[in-house]
Amino acid sequence: MKDLNMYFHTPYCKAKCRFCSFYVIPGRKSRLEDYFIALKNEIKSYKEELVNYNVKTIYVGGGTPSLVDSIYITEIIQYIKNNFVVNNNCEISVENNPETLTENKIKDYYSVGVNRLSIGLQTTQDNVLKFMGRLYTFDEFKEKYAIAKQSPIQNINLDLIFGIPTLTLENWEEALNKTIELNPTHISTYSLEIDEDSIFGYLEKKGRFKRMDERLDRKMYKLSKKILKQNGYNQYEISNSAKPGYECQHNSNIWKGQDYIGFGASSHSRFGNQRYNNINSLEKYIQLIENNLSSKENIQNLTIKDLLNERIVLNLRTTSGIDFKNIEEDFNINFVEQYQESITRLYSQKLISVNKNYLNLTSKGQNLESIVNLEFFN
């Protein structure tokens, strides 16, 4: 059977964070019941197509899945388990925001097999949390995190963001150390990205937001890797570090090139030889599904070259890098021979390291990832 990873999107949020560019509905639970009925029906529409697939991971993202009543989340997960071939060791993750996480919700998640929680902390300084539009203080976060730590779900990721203009290098070091003290199994550290669809993006256009100096941003990234490694968190991808055995399987499988299908409004998929997304509107999504119509748009039929380029980009994000044997098996090419000139140039610039079986980004290469990618595409 072929491996498959599933994602479903919960677009509801209390408020939209200033850095967020995802499709969310802030401040209200518009057509909540109708949305989850449509979500279940969309998943159902794939039943025959996925009869020969083994679901390796299920990821519940948003938005804020923990904002809605847990019955909506658990019913979808249970429906997937009842109607598809789901791996016995399936990783099932649910994203949470601290202000909406409760003991009862965690118990309900656990009852249907959820074994991983991802909680958006972002930083530990209250003034920075407020600047970003978060709805809690660090002390309030710790109260909710303690509930999660006491639950049966012991695989917990915490998200952090650096590169925030009001954040100093000292602030960032403090945030890392305080997060490590909480002893999660996984820590994600992302550089703040400014999307034009976010509130920060809007403020930037108006001249009311200035990005952090890139050199300071890179110093923060370098500091992250150093401190996390010193404390037993192994970096396995550019933005992700984990204690041994706690790497996120959902993301890892996608970086390896496995298929994934996203369900719900605005979700993205790469399934078979196609890449597509669902329509970016809750109302239109519900209407299409109610009328037994496809919610897909921007369907792209991928060529072998497209698939190879995607595999290169995703593999390079990981510390394990490009596996020459896997590339040869999947694409019937000798990677080293086909990209010899690019490999020689990048190696001379100390952006990559190469051994008999793998090609990896160096520390310098991680900072210049986009340049490395372009070299392979030329």
Image (cartoon, rainbow, N blue to C red):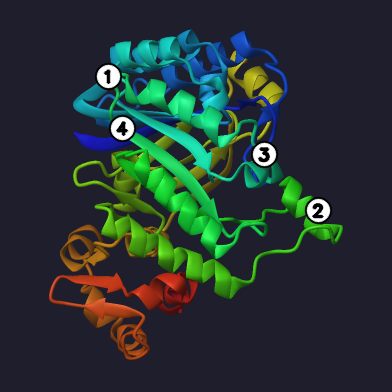
Quadrant of the image occupied by residue 116: top left
Residue 334 visible to an observer of this rendering: yes
Foreground residue among 185 and 175: 175
Q: Real-space Cα distance between discs 1 and 2?
A: 42 Å
Q: In this view, does 38 lie to the left or right of 341?
A: right
Outermost residue to the left: 356
Q: In this view, does 289 lie to the left or right of 359?
A: right
Quadrant of the image occupied by residue 92: top left
> How crowded is the residue under tag 3: few (<14 C-alpha within 10 Å), some, or many (20+)?
many
Foreground residue among 231 and 326: 231
Q: Would you say the residues marked 1 and 4 are in contact, meaning their CB atoms lie under 8 Å apart?
A: no
Q: Real-space Cα distance between discs 1 and 4?
A: 19 Å
Q: Quarter of the image containing the N terminus?
A: top left
Q: Mark 1 points at which residue?
A: 152
Q: Is mark 3 on a helix, strand or loop?
A: loop
Mark 1 vs mark 4: in front: 1
Mark 1 vs mark 2: in front: 1
Mark 2 vs mark 4: in front: 2
Looking at the rendered structure, the kind of residue marked 4 is: Thr
Q: Would you say the residues marked 2 and 4 are in contact, meaning their CB atoms lie under 8 Å apart?
A: no
Q: Name the residue under label 3.
A: 17
Mark 1 vs mark 3: in front: 1
Looking at the rendered structure, the kind of residue marked 1 is: Pro
Q: Position of residue 277 (x, y in %)?
A: 55, 39
> How crowded is the residue under tag 4: few (<14 C-alpha within 10 Å), some, or many (20+)?
many
Q: Position of residue 285 (x, y in %)?
A: 63, 24
Outermost residue to the right: 206
Q: Mark 4 points at which residue?
A: 57
The numbered mark at residue 203 is: 2
Q: What element carries label 2?
A: helix
Q: Which of marks 2 and 4 is nearer the N terminus?
A: 4
